[in-house]
Amino acid sequence: MCCQQSGRVALAGCAKRFYPLQVFFVISGYFSYKLYLRYEPRHWLKVRMERVSIPRLTAVPQFF
């Protein structure tokens, strides 16, 4: 874990490490919602599955 040290310095280090991931998910959710409003739900789901499943399927052989 990154928070083995005690004190404010360790807490600041942990916040700096995990903060960008949270920001990424907030921004991703915002743009996903904007696309959901633009397209009809079926088309949005089709495009979303393509964008998620293609990278996932290409990463599967790396785990075996």
Image (tube, rainbow, N blue to C red):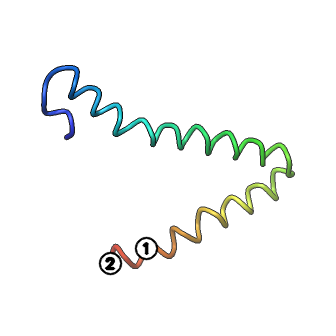
Q: What residue type is labelled 1?
A: Val
Which residue is under mark 2?
64
Is 26 in front, or is 42?
26
Q: Measured from the top left, where is residue 54 in percent x and y?
A: 59, 71
For marks 2 and 1, give the CA distance.
7 Å
Judged left or right of residue 17, residue 43 is: right
Q: Is 36 drawn above or below residue 57 in the view shown?
A: above
Quadrant of residue 55 within the rendered picture: bottom right
Q: Measured from the top left, where is residue 36 in percent x and y?
A: 78, 46
Q: Which residue lies furthest to the top in this view?
A: 8
On residue 60, the disc is 1
Name the residue at 45% across, 72% down: 59
Element carrying mark 2: loop
Q: Measured from the top left, where is residue 12 in percent x and y?
A: 29, 27
Q: Measured from the top left, where is residue 21 in percent x and y?
A: 45, 42
How many numbered marks appear?
A: 2
Judged left or right of residue 7, residue 25 is: right
Q: Which residue lies furthest to the front in this view?
A: 9
Q: Local crowd at mark 1 within 10 Å, few (<14), some, or many (≥20)?
A: few
Is 4 in front, or is 36?
4
Is 50 in front, or is 35?
35
Name the residue at 81% across, 56% down: 42
Name the residue at 34% across, 73% down: 63
Q: What residue type is labelled 2?
A: Phe
Element carrying mark 1: helix
- Whether tag 2 and tag 1 are in contact, CB under 8 A, the answer is yes
Q: Which residue lies furthest to the left in this view?
A: 5
Judged left or right of residue 40, residue 34 is: left
Judged left or right of residue 59, residue 55 is: right
Quarter that holds the C terminus = bottom left
Q: Is 4 drawn above or below residue 40 in the view shown?
A: above
